[in-house]
Image: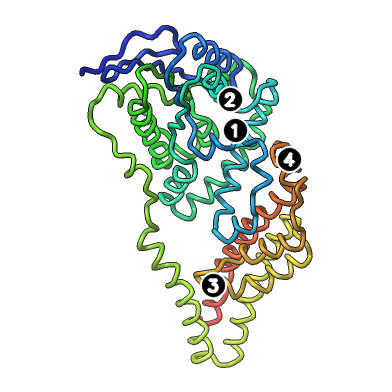
Amino acid sequence: MENTLEPAETSDIHRLSFQGKQILLIGTAHVSRHSAQLVEETILEQNPDTVCVELCTTRLASIQDSDRWRNMDIVKVIKQKKALMLFMNLLLASFQKKIADKFDIKPGQEMINAIESAKKTDALIVPADREIQITLSRVWRGMGFWEKLKLMTSIVFSFGESDGIQEEDIERMKQEDILQTLLADVKKAHPIIEKALIDERDRYLAQSIRSAPGEKIVAVVGAAHVPGIKRYMADDTPIDLADLNQVPPAGNMGSILKWLIPGLILLLFVVGFMMEGKNAGTDMLWIWIAANGIFAGLGAVLALAHPYTIISSIIAAPLTSLNPMIAAGWVSGLVEAFARKPKVRDLEAIPTDIVSIKGFWRNNVTRILLVVIFTNLGSSIGTMTAVPLMLKLLS
């Protein structure tokens, strides 16, 4: 059956038809009171068979389970090497929550209204978006070290930008994904961000919505995704969700460098002892230990880590920097987790504490994430500092 795009009822509501299914696409701002009201009124009025929401399964579960933080195991997060991803998620949630609190609305209230209204009308709820971890991983894998550092810096410095946002700016934000708003400066230089955050998700959402069960469907998505969804909806070309769900493997160059750099540093020690003698070789060792230990320790200090954690980062960094399988931050993060074991109240306070920079350092859970990130960053700086000094001894 031919697919058509019928004229929109309003600037926020778009009527689509796909193979006999009637689809009402609502473009929203994630922190707009008007959007939240529009979603609720539309679903109750239309009484659809299915309501699709711009949420992945994980985010849908988190909305439906307000006590989800109580079940988080921070030690498991560190061991699974997911500390950085969790930290990025919290920063994004913080940005959205600060804006929402400013205008007295819950973050993602339009999604909450969509879910509650769907339940009232006995409509099936379909999480139509790709898992956030896959999206962030696809962005992360597509960037180099300095690009990643710039990305993290941009997110951190945008933390306070929500203070200057006025209510009239919310309507402008309808034209952007919340991630787009945060990464506006970075995405211009890194096309992979635009591709993974917007275009890939437009395709994913379009396929999820048009393949959802039921003859009458209401889909609630960020307004930034509406043009792309409409474009892909009008095309009969199948969209392979399995392909969009794949996390690209680490590049060969990254895998090679992970082993090559420690190997070259060890070779540098050998050359130092053989060519310049015991004294020069010993000096090189001390330079390596001091640079890695001091900078990793400073990273732990900046995170306001426990004294035991600071000591552990100083001891671990010179060794972990030569081991591609272990990072200094993982060691210090685990020590911090045991030295200041998070309590239930820390887990419960995460949604409140992430609203302020001070809260990130005050909460035992988020402080552990800061310890992991800052210690790893310090260790990397230590390595980049030590190598030139060691080479200078050879010359």
Of label 4 and label 1, which has the lower sequence position? Answer: 1
Instruction: Give the residue type that dot 2 points to.
Output: Ile
Dot 2 alpha-carbon crowd within 10 angstroms: few under 14, some 14 to 19, many 20 or more: some
Q: Residue at x 37, y 31 (%)?
A: 208
Instruction: Name the mark on residue 376.
Output: none
Q: How far apart are marks 2 and 4 (CA)?
A: 22 Å
Q: Where residue 283 sits: x, y (%)? A: 62, 83
Instruction: Give the number of the mark in front: 3 or 4.
Output: 4
Instruction: Name the mark on residue 387.
Output: 3
Looking at the image, do the residues carrying marks 4 and 1 touch, with CB atoms under 8 Å apart? Answer: no
Colour scheme of the rendered structure: rainbow
Looking at the image, do the residues carrying marks 1 and 2 touch, with CB atoms under 8 Å apart? Answer: yes
* Name of the residue lying farthest toward the left: 1
| Secondary structure at numbered mark 3 | helix
- Judging by the rendered image, the residue that carries numbered circle 2 is 112
Q: How far apart are marks 1 and 2 (CA)?
A: 7 Å
Instruction: Give the residue type that dot 3 points to.
Output: Val
